[in-house]
Image (tube, rainbow, N blue to C red):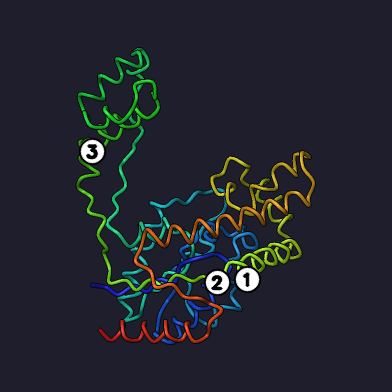
Amino acid sequence: MIKVLVVGGVTGTGKSALGVKLAKLFNGEIISGDSVAVYKELTIGSAKILPKDMEGVVHHGIDLLSLEETFNVRDFQMYGRKKIEEIVSKGKLPIIVGGTGLYIRALLYDYVFMDEVDIDMRWADSLSNTELHDELSKVDAQQAQLIHANNRKRVLRAISIAMANQKSKTELISEQTHSMLYDAKILACTLPRVQLYQRLNSRVEKMMEAGLLDEVKQAVVKAGWDHPVMSAIGYKEFKDYLDEKISLDDAISLVKRNTRRFAKRQITWFMHQMPCRWVNMDDEIEVNQAIEEVKVWMSR
C-alpha cells in the first residue's frame, strides 16, 4: 500500500511547522488538509502557512481557487488522491497537514459520495407528503422507515439519490466498508488545555493586528455571506458587527470562543474517527519520539 503521513489534530498547535520538518526529513511534499486555505483571498483567518515558512517544501492545496468558486469535501477527495499519486510517482512521501478532519478522512478511507444530479423532481409537486413517502418506500424501504413522511426534503433527497445512482441510498451505504486505502501514519497534534486556549486567544489578537477585519470585508464584497466558506470561524463572527448589531470587541470575543470550541471538537473528532498517535507539541521529547516512530514506519 502507498504510505501517507498525516499531521492532523488541533488548530494552533504547530501542525504546519511539524509538517515542514517531517517533509525535509523524509523527502516529502505536503497536501494541505484545510477547507479554508484553498481560497486565495483568505490568508489571515485561515492561518495558512506563508511561503517564507515553507522552507522550500512543496505545498499543494493552498491558494487553489478564488472566492468566485467553491470547494467541498468531494472536490478535496478527488484533488488529494490525484496529488498523492503524483507525489508518489516522484519517489516522494505524501504528507497531509491540516485540521479539517472530514476532508482527511474522506481522502484516506474508501468513502464514496452519492451522486445528486439535477433530476427533474417536478412530478413530486402534486403529491402529498404521504404519497411521496409511499414512492420512497418503493425504491428504498429502509430509508422510508427511517425518514418521517413529513420530512419532505429528506424524502425527496433519498428518492433523488436512488434515481441518480440506480441504487437505493441503503444499498450505497452497505457497499461502503470505510476501510483505509493507504498505509497511513496519523499524528494528531495537541497541547495542554490551558496553554492551548491561551495560544488560541493570542492568535486571534495577532490576526486582528494583521488585518483580519479588512480581509473579511473584502471577502464579503467578493463572495457575499452566502458563500459556504463564509460560515468558517474567523469570518462568520463579523457579520453582526458589519450589520451594526454588535461591537467589534464582541465579535472578537466570539471568534476566540468559537475557536476554543472548535479545538475541543477537533480533539473529540480525531480521537474517535481515526487511529491517531497523539503528540503533545509542548513536549520536545514526545515530538522527537513521534518522529522516531515515523522513521520506523517508513522502514517497514
**SS at circle 2:** loop
Helix, strand or loop under label 1: helix
Give x and y (percent) for residue 275. 34, 66
Q: Callout 3, which amino acid?
A: Thr
x, y percent for residue 109: 30, 59
Nearest to N terminus: mark 3 or mark 2: 3
| Mark-to-mark CA distance, 1 and 2 | 7 Å
Residue 126 picture quarter: top left
Labelled pair 1, 2 in contact (Cβ < 8 Å): yes
Give how far apart the Cα atoms at labels 1 and 3 are: 45 Å
Q: Name the one closer to the observer, 83 or 258.
A: 258
Q: Please say if 15 is above or below 172.
A: below
**What is the x, y in percent for residue 49?**
57, 71
Residue on which the image places disc 3: 170
Q: Is residue 295 above or below residue 185?
A: below
Q: Amino acid at mark 2?
A: Leu
- Measure how far apart labels 3 and 2 are at the Cα level: 40 Å
Q: Nearer the viewer, residue 146 or 172?
A: 146
Residue 69 % position (x, y): 52, 49
In which quarter of the view is residue 122 placed?
Answer: top left
Q: Is 9 drawn above or below residue 151 in the view shown? A: below
Quadrant of image for the N terminus = bottom left
Mark 2 and mark 3 in contact (Cβ < 8 Å)?
no
Mark 3 crowdedness (10 Å alpha carbons): few <14, some 14-19, many ≥20: some
Q: Secondary structure at mark 3?
A: helix
Reading the image, the residue beneath label 1 is: 195
The residue to which callout 2 is attached is: 191
Amino acid tagged 1: Gln
